[in-house]
Image (cartoon, rainbow, N blue to C red):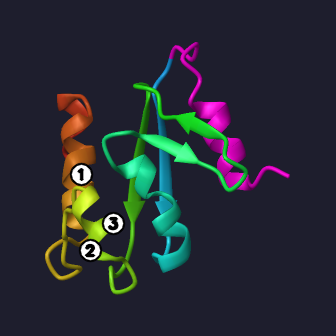
Amino acid sequence: TTGVFAAMWTKFNNRNNAYNTWIIADGPVDAIWIEDLNTVLDDNKILTLANGDRIPMTDNVKMMFEVETLVNASPATVSRAGIIYVSDTDLDWAPVIESWVRKREASRQELW
């Protein structure tokens, strides 16, 4: 049977999709499943399933991992991913609110 991730991968990596799709993986990095994604993260960008099926990543699909730690990630995985480190002490709620306020029309930017 097809797993959840493989089913999502097949659905979203369709060249006929007229829109961009982001697949967001939010949670801890598990050494076993992240190693299975190394073929997706390298230049091939192909998901290789245990049954031998190979599903390419299309140009309209992007992937992002939001993790707390990389302690279980191998050097091979880390070297394939672009990593942005944001300390929880450097980013709080204020930048999010400021960005939202700036997007409002000028007459509605005053908060109080």
Where residue 36 appears, as percent x and y from the top left, is 52, 62
Residue beneath the point at 55% across and 69% down:
33
Residue 111: numbered disc: 1
Residue type indicated by callout 2: Pro
Q: Which residue is mark 3?
A: 77
Which of the pair 68/61 is nearer the observer? 61
Compared with 35, 61 (above or below) is: above
CA separation in Å, label 1 and label 2:
46 Å
Where on the picture, by quarter, is residue 110?
top left
Marked residue nearer the N-terminal end (3 or 1): 3
SS of the residue under disc 3: helix
CA separation in Å, label 3 and label 1:
44 Å
Residue type indicated by callout 1: Leu
Residue 25 lies in the magenta stretch = no
Marked residue nearer the N-terminal end (1 or 2): 2
Q: Which residue is mark 2?
A: 75
> Which contiguous range is marked in magenta?
1-18
Camera-nearest label, 1 or 2: 2
Residue beneath the point at 19% across and 71% down:
86
Residue 16 lies in the magenta stretch = yes
